[in-house]
Amino acid sequence: MADRILVLNTGSSSIKYELVDPRTRERPARGLVERIGEEQGRLTHRSGDGPPYVRDRPFPGHDEGLEAMMEAFAAAGPEPTPIAVGHRVVHGGIRFAEAVLIDDEVIAAIEELAPLAPLHNPVNLTGIRLARKMFPEVPQVAVFDTAFHRTLPPEAYTYAVPREWRERLGVRRFGFHGTSCAYVSRRAAAFLGRDPQEVNLIVLHLGNGASATAIEGGRSVDTSMGMTPLEGLVMGTRSGDADPALAGYLARAGGLDAQQVEHALSHQGGLLALTGSSDMREVRGRDDDEARLALEIYTRRIRKYVGAYHALLGRVDAIVFTGGVGENDAATRAACLAGLGRLGIAVDPGSNQGESAGERAVSPPGAEVPVLVIPTDEEWEIARQTLARLPSTGRS
């Protein structure tokens, strides 16, 4: 029987799930329960090549969402019978450097880390607790977004802030999108025909959330997201880099408290603040000064990080685009790397156009620094790491 892993990505108002065989990469089923807690929700379940199984009804909580997932498996197949459940957990802090088998101690530790990711870790825990009840005899594994960046050196993760903040409160850079970076960095090395430990990469994960990561010999050595996913690039609703004094100024001049400022920078910033839309496709489709300025701000920030990470690494073997925007938006790819020809970085207009599926180079033939598009596969990466943690696999 196939070694199927049920991958769960539990969000604040959604549950994304996929049944994956990490050895063969077969995907017997996948689905999404969305708008949990709203007046009307939707479950969309896909199995095989048939039409999707769709149910529109309210899902008051995540428990009803997971029950609906199991109903969909029963109605549309296949029988899930996973050998393990792999959970995406956003923040592992300094505690977790790799995926771990979940027990009560791990759950307590993830809960303790909730202040670092208040929008993510609590709902990730909800999914874990419910899945443990639903599959009581099945091992559960937590795979952390932050784990890949545990290789950051002290000069990369240390903020120049008071010692008490650093030592007592744990203020430091953690980085995110680590599951995606782990996957695409290995795939990029394979595309280049080299061992990951030989390759220096700059990975640009561009989606609604966006980050840049410098990878040296398969290890993360710097990344744009910080203690939280707010720092770094301009994103769909996140501002990215902003003056730290902004909170104090807004408190004095606007009467806003810290929570209001944090919420606005995370949920009302980025492309949404600049254009009224957080969707890059909508912004790209417009022809007005507001949209043009937003696109220049967005791509300029990325160019700055590419240049900085090129200087940091000294030698770059490839630039890697991934994520929804990075994989599908040719114009954004070209604009992000415009003017970097002196660094050996360029995009070939012909190769770059279109939305061709699969791994590919979009740089000119023989380019000094290849520019690659590597579609990410976080679900398979979670399944792979989950399988590796199971004692029966003989691997650690």
Image (tube, grey):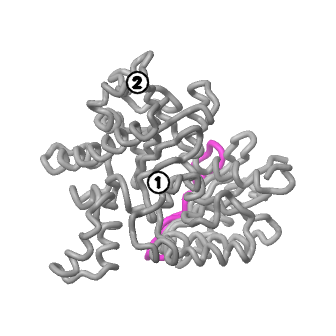
Residue 364: image x %, image y %? 39, 19
Asked if residue 222 is positioned above or below residue 12 in the image, the reply reads above
Q: CA distance from mark 1 to mark 2?
A: 30 Å
The boundaries of the magenta stretch are: 32-53
Q: Nearer the viewer, mark 1 or mark 2?
A: 1
Q: Can I make out residue 53 in this image?
A: no
Q: Residues within 10 Å of mark 1 (few under 14, many from 20)?
A: some
- Residue 155 relative to residue 75: left or right: left
Q: Amino acid at mark 1?
A: Ala
Disc 1 designates what residue? 156
Residue displayed at 41% across by 47% down: 206
Classify 172 as above or below 389: below
Q: Of 99 and 155, which appears nearest the observer?
A: 155
Q: Magenta includes 39? A: yes
Tell whether position 198 is magenta.
no
Q: Amino acid at mark 2?
A: Ser
- Camera-side residue of 90 and 228: 228
Q: In which image quadrant can residue 44 be found?
A: bottom right
Q: Is residue 45 left or right of residue 226?
A: right
Residue located at (36% from left, 42% from top): 308
Element under disc 2: loop
Residue wearing tag 2: 363
Label 2, residues with CA under 10 Å away: few <14, some 14-19, many ≥20: many
Does 29 appear above or below 122? above
Which percent across, then down, holds residue 171? 47, 70
Q: Position of residue 37 (x, y in %)?
A: 48, 76
